[in-house]
Image (spheres, rainbow, N blue to C red):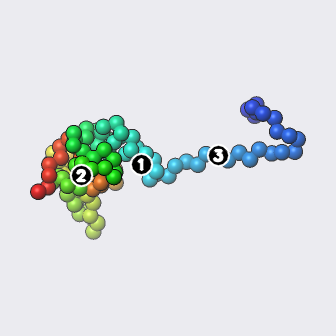
Amino acid sequence: MTEPALFDLPPGVVADVQPAEEPSRGERRRRLIERRIAGGLHPLGYVRLHDDAAQSREGSGLRCGSCRWRVQVEYHNSVYPKCDFGDGSRISGCESSDIRAWWPACRDHESAD
């Protein structure tokens, strides 16, 4: 049985209903990161943002790229940016723990100077 229509179409007209496109994996990830930042969380999701962190991708403030804990980890002839804070407890073997330089700084940010 089909759902009743809100309006009847004239005889002989067929409704062209397009299914909603599912967002790509990358788009879902981008939206998740935006929601976390807007909610005051670091993109990793389980640590608060620094009080002086950048509030947007274009804004000014502290970022992961200037933090001493952001390190390059080599694995199988590739290099991945990871957070080495807490003896590497934030490092995992998946892309979701790669630390982008533009991300706003977390509460544990320390300048790389």
Q: Amino acid at mark 1?
A: Arg
Q: CA distance from mark 3 to mark 2?
A: 39 Å
The residue labelled by disc 1 is 29
**Outermost residue, bottom direction?**
77
Whether pointer 3 and pointer 2 mark residues with C-beta atoms closer than 8 Å, the reply is no
Residues at badges 3 and 1 in contact (C-beta under 8 Å)? no
Q: Which mark is residue 105?
A: none
User: Amino acid under label 3?
Assistant: Pro
Disc 3/disc 1 C-alpha distance (Å): 22 Å
Which quadrant of the structure image shows residue 52? top left
Which part of the image, by quadrant, shows the N terminus? top right
Query: Which comes before the other along the chain, label 3 or label 2?
Result: 3
Which residue is tagged 3?
19
- How many numbered callouts? 3
Position in image of residue 113 (x %, y %): 11, 57
Q: Is residue 24 left or right of residue 106?
A: right
Q: Of the residues shown, which amino acid type is indicated by label 2?
A: Cys
Q: Which residue is mark 2?
A: 64
Dot 1: few (<14), some (14–19), or many (≥20) neighbours within 10 Å? some
